[in-house]
Image (cartoon, helix red, strand yellow):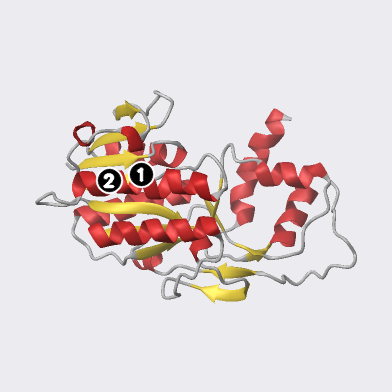
Amino acid sequence: MANILIAGCGDLGSGLSTELIAQGHVVTGIRRTKNKFPNGVIGITGDLVEMSDDALPDADVVFLIMTPNGRNEEAYRAAYFDTAQVLIRRYRDMAKQPKVFFVSSTSVYGQSQGEWVDETTPAQPTSATAKILLETEQSLSAAFSSVAVRCSGIYGSGRYRLLETVLSGKDWEANSWTNRIHRDDVVSALVLLANSALTDKTIPAQVIVTDQTPVSMWEVKLWLATCLGSKVAVSSSEGFVPTSGKRIQGQYLLSQGWRLQYPSYVAGYHELLREFNALR
């Protein structure tokens, strides 16, 4: 039995905490606003940045799973870098430091000419928000034995933005490569990483979580448009071959026995479409 802190107990954190509690661990979860937590979680509601050190429990493993309030530089710094500093202050000088996992993003790979990317690829972010993510990763790794868990585009229950975009009928932007991962597969990856840490397995400093199936955005939208019966909003002057983006694969999790429940967008979006259509 281990003490595990989930700083950011939203959708991903709730799924992770449920699995860890089922394994017999003691889980403390922090949420910024809501006070509803999964059964068995020791819940703390409040802004992590404003919490005193004694509000945070001793922990064997810490997950930082934050969601910014916006897609700008200020929101990312508040959600990621500033919260990481609280964890560093609280746990850095402990005799036995926790293993820290930071749920980051594959946006730290700035490549955008169709390159193949894996865990050996250097992170070279180009956007301001991605630079903050990498800065947060580096800050944590300087203080702890930490792991940057770099997820590609997360989709799943309740995440309808792409479906709504396809239904809107707006012209599709230029085609690009896209990489996706279902929310449930992210949770299973985080559970595997927690168990690896608790059994003292060596984990690389960067781990990629993606479905291993890079695909062109137009292919995804065309399939969704067909399923939804909506307009295929492609300009005839644009080519079908992706002109930007990257193709991402990760090897570490697969080498540890991780198996995807949704190995492609087709497998994952079938369930999401049923949920979405029931609300229409």
Where is the N terminus found, in terms of image quarters? top left
Looking at numbered disc 1 in the image, what kind of residue is underneath it? Answer: Thr
* Disc 1 from disc 2: Cα separation: 7 Å
Which residue does the numbered mark 2 point to in the structure image? 87
201 sits left or right of 29 in the view:
left
Q: Are marks 1 and 2 in contact (CB under 8 Å)?
A: yes
Residue 187 visible in the shown view? no
Quadrant housing the C terminus: top right
Of all residues shown, which one is farthest toward the right? 236
Say which quarter of the image contains residue 47: top left
Whole-percent x, y for residue 6 in the image: 32, 40
Which numbered dot is residue 83?
1
Q: Is residue 277 left or right of residue 265?
A: right
> Camera-side residue: 191 or 106?
106
- Is 23 or 162 nearer to us in this picture? 162
The crowd level at tag 1 (other Cα within 10 Å; few <14, some 14-19, many 20+) is many
